[in-house]
Image (spheres, rainbow, N blue to C red):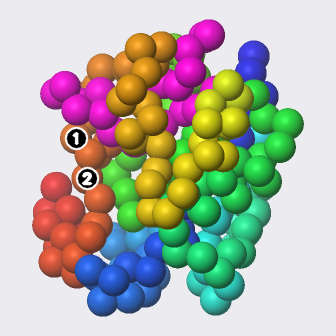
Amino acid sequence: MMKLAAIVLAAGAGTRFGGDKLSAQFRGEPLLTHAIRAARAAPVERVIVVCPPALDIGEWDGLPPVEALRIASTELSTSLKAGIAEAAGAEGVFVFLGDMPLIPHHLPAELAAAIGGHFAAIPHYRNRAGHPVLLSARAFPEIAQLAGDDGAGRLLKARNDVAFVETEDEGVMLDVDRAEDIARLERR
């Protein structure tokens, strides 16, 4: 069994939302809480939340532990690289996005079962790649080369050694960008 960790990317500025997006209420809890809960449901030893210095990630008891990695940058590449560096020793890292509250909790185990010798495992909803993404340790050196607001998407699209896990759960595609997205997702 692979030694896996999860990172939850939560350091963005939330500009389109109007700021403080991850503290906004979704189904009675901060939006970020839902992403952390999905990450904790994954077959991981630890969960690392990459967030700005002032963000409250809440209190979490039990295993896997939830750790805050506080960074000043809002760049996606910086958050991703910091989270992977913090997960040193892991053979693979799940990448969850803090603004995606409807990730099905069973899916990370399916991704872990599918990765094998692949570079990454990605959920696939109606011919579109979703989240979370499971990156193998082979991906880490290439992730380290990313810059600016680029995530791993472009890198993964260029590869032919990615495992896709088909799902009919649209939650792998649904994120919150604007304040009105909260109400739209709560109706689902």
Residue at 33% x, 70% y: name it. 27
Q: Picture coordinates of residue 170 (x, y %)?
A: 22, 41
Disc sitting over residue 170 in the figure: 1
Q: Picture coordinates of residue 62 (x, y %)?
A: 77, 55
Q: Would residue 186 appear left or right of 95 to someone viewing this image?
A: left
Depth check: 6 or 155 in front?
155
Judging from the image, what secondary structure is the residue with disc 2 in? loop
What residue type is disc 1 on? Glu
Q: Can residue 45 be seen in this view?
A: yes
Number of labels in the image equals 2
Q: Would residue 52 appear left or right of 89 to someone viewing this image?
A: left
Looking at the picture, does residue 40 appear above or below residue 15?
A: above
Graded by Cα atoms within 10 Å as few (under 14), some (14 to 19) or many (20 or more), the crowding at tag 2 reads some
Depth check: 150 or 25 in front?
150
Q: Which image quadrant is residue 188 in?
A: bottom left
Mark 2–mark 1 contact, CB under 8 Å? yes
Looking at the picture, does residue 183 appear above or below residue 127?
A: below
Disc sitting over residue 174 in the figure: 2
The residue lying furthest to the top in this view is 117
Depth check: 2 or 80 in front?
80
Residue at 62% x, 46% y: name it. 145
Which image quarter is the N terminus in? top right
What residue type is disc 2 on? Leu
Residue at 62% x, 10% y: name it. 117
Q: Picture coordinates of residue 184 (x, y %)?
A: 14, 67
Does the magenta portion include 127?
Answer: yes
Numbered range of the magenta stretch: 116-136
Disc sitting over residue 154 in the figure: none
Q: How far apart are marks 2 and 1 (CA)?
A: 7 Å
